[in-house]
Amino acid sequence: MSDIQILALDPADGDLVSGAFEVLRAAHAADAPEAPAPHEGKFRLGLIHPVPDEDQAIHLAVRDGAVLGLADAGYPNRENLHFGWATITVHPEHRRQGVGSALLDAFIADAKGRGRTTLTLDTRMTWEDGIERSDAGRRFAEKHGFESALTWINRRCAVDALDAAAEQELLEKSQAAAGDAYEIISWIGRTPEHLVDTMARIDSTILAEVPLGDLELEPETIDAELKHAKADRNEAMGVIPIQTIAVDRATGEAVANTAVFAYDDPEYTDAFQGITIVNPEHRGHRLGTLLKILNLRLVRENYPAVRTIWTDNADVNAPMIGINVILGYEILDAGAEFQRKFAA
């Protein structure tokens, strides 16, 4: 392995950026061609416009100028300063040569240098009757002392999975269950200014409400400044949020939220379901189902090129899984987060 260099990816180095993306493209084709393909424009723009509440570091394994693999790592920079994550991808033609281990060593060294003591790696897995996946990622993680901490199920749904009559019936039942206590508001793109503060408050509850398995993460504090910074990044990258919320008429606060993210690319046929969350005090009114159906209709009306919506849920998140099954989501495979803790 002495002929392999580990380099930090410079977004201005066009050759290395192209090489890194080629690794992602080739790995997708070999490992999970049924999943959404990596989007080159989003990848390149994401390097230039980093996530505002996370520090990104991409390490490349390079030999003779060719990129063999990459470790894409992120470090929260507001809360959870003990934590770091990485996705390690090696080109199919260069596996079982120590490339992944070299990249993992670079990630661990970088993370320790930043004072991080809990690190995770993620990988795809087979789930139930979904598509069979290699267990090489699991074996790699376990070989290096990482233990399974969280499993999520990847699902896909055609935008027209339900026939019109069944969808309308489901919508009407959900509307009846919600009653008149809520105002339903939808938008595309940036959050309307008068809703930024209430959306920041509901976003701040996400990590406290979603199942995290054995991951020890504290809730994030989202404020208006961060909401605006994330919206700026989405606009710069051509990522378009399509969002529907329920506002409690009694308090004026957002109490339920769902969002789908599409790309400003008419040839890209995939969109991605983000977090759907309902305030615990307002559960039992079928708000999750109501918002997801209305938002789905918004996607169909405004983004006719989108044919499939993708989502993932923790395997223990029974309520959201139940909603997704009703809406026509089908299992593709699963993913897992493997965790290792280090001394401070």
Image: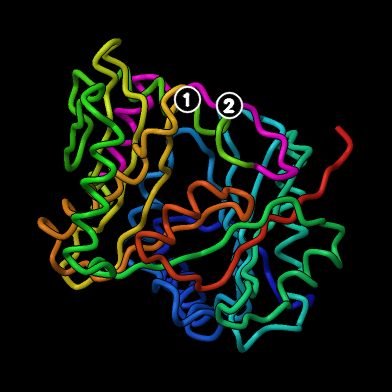
Q: Is residue 338 left or right of residue 292?
A: right
Q: Is residue 44 left or right of residue 337?
A: left
> Which residue position is annotated with label 1?
204
Neighbour class for label 1 at 10 Å: few (<14), some, many (≥20)?
Answer: some
Q: Disc 2 residue type?
A: Pro
Image quadrant assignment for residue 220: top right
> Which residue position is annotated with label 2?
219
Q: Disc 1 residue type?
A: Ser
Q: Are marks 2 and 1 in contact (CB under 8 Å)?
A: yes
Residue occupying the far top of the picture: 251
Circle 1 SS class? loop
Q: Is residue 221 magenta?
A: yes
Q: Residue at x 77, y 49 (%)?
A: 109
Circle 2 SS class? loop
Q: Residue at x 37, y 53 (%)?
A: 273
Please state the extent of the stretch shown in magenta in the rendering.
212-234
The percent coordinates of residue 104 (x first, y second) are: 74, 61
Image quadrant assignment for residue 135: bottom right
Quadrant of image for the N terminus: bottom right
Quadrant of image for the C terminus: top right
